[in-house]
Structure formats: C-alpha cells, structure tokens
C-alpha cells in the first residue's frame, strides 16, 4: 500500500501576501544579502553560473521562510509556493507586484545589445 502524497498547503490570497512579504524581507537580512551578493559575484553575470550558484542560495532563503507555512523544506516546496503565487498574480495586483519584486531580487537585469549597432535618436 503506497503512502498518500503530502498535502500541498493551501493559502488564501491574504496569506500568500504575508508569506511573499516575509520572503522578500528575508532577502534583506544582512546575512542573506551577503550570501546572495557573494553568489552573484562568483557567477560574474553568467546566466549558467547564476543558475548554479545564485539559484540554490535563493531557494534556501525562501525555504527558511515558507517551511513555517507547511511547505516542505526541499526545492519542491519552493516550486509549489511559486505555483501558488503565479495563480494569484492574475487575481491580485499586490501579489503580482510583490512577485515581480521577488523575481528582480533573484535575477540580474537583462541587458540586450541593440540590433544593428547604435540606437537612432528620436
């Protein structure tokens, strides 16, 4: 007899806002900010290295917060939380804004070189 899979935590939009706020604040804690900065510097703005070095640190920081809300303490919990946030993004502008802020903390700004050289003046 197989054991039942763990129940996914169900959060309301209000609870999701609270958890997202706590996750964003966790990135501001000096120890976590230093960990993220060190990982970013080691990655040298190389997207492959960002995935190898920055993403695991960011996942750990998120896990430390969301485990208190019933999400498992592994990468799967972060993915489930991300899916929950994604679901509420279309319904709640505050969650959408907080989600965008979290993404900006995780990913470097992408700069695309202009096509064909210089950008013409308008």
Image (cartoon, rainbow, N blue to C red):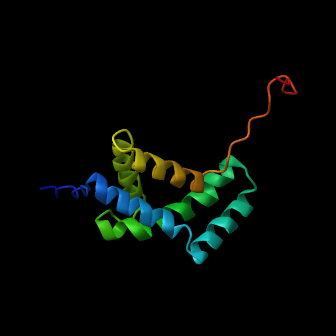
Quarter of the view holding residue 32: bottom right
x 37%, y 62%: residue: 19
Quarter of the C terminus within the rendering: top right
Q: Residue 43, image x and y in percent? A: 71, 57
Q: Residue furthest left?
A: 1
In which quadrant of the rendered view does residue 40 lie? bottom right
Residue at x-position 73% and y-position 52%: 45
The answer to whether residue 60 is visible is no
Q: In this view of the protein, which residue sits in the foreground, 32 or 19?
A: 19
Task: Residue at 16%, 55% (x, y): give it.
Answer: 2
Q: Left of 41 or right of it: where is 9?
A: left
Residue extending farthest to the front is 122
Residue lying at the far right of the rendered structure = 118
In screen coordinates, is 103 left or right of 53?
Answer: left
**Residue depicted at x 84% and y 27%:** 119
Q: Position of residue 11 (x, y in %)?
A: 26, 56
Front residue of this view, candidates 121 and 18 = 121
Numbered disc total: 0
Q: Position of residue 17 (x, y in %)?
A: 36, 57
| Horizontal arrangement in the rendering, residue 75 relative to residue 107 (left or right) | left
Q: Residue 81: horizontal and vertical position, in percent?
A: 37, 54
**Which residue ends up furthest to the bottom in the rendered image?**
31
- For the N terminus, the image quarter is bottom left
Using the rendered image of the protein, determine whether residue 102 is visible from the camera's viewpoint. yes
């Amino acid at each position: 007899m197989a054991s039942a899979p763990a129940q996914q935590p169900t959060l309301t939009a209000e609870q999701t806002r609270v958890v997202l706020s706590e996750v964003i604040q966790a990135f501001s804690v000096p120890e976590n900010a230093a960990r993220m900065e060190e990982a970013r510097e080691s990655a040298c703005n190389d997207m492959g290295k960002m995935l190898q070095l920055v993403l695991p640190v960011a996942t750990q920081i998120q896990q430390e917060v969301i485990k208190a809300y019933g999400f498992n303490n592994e990468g799967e919990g972060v993915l489930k939380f991300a899916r929950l946030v994604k679901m509420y993004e279309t319904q709640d502008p505050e969650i959408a804004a907080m989600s965008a802020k979290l993404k900006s903390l995780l990913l470097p700004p992408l700069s695309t070189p202009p096509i064909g050289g210089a950008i013409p003046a308008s």
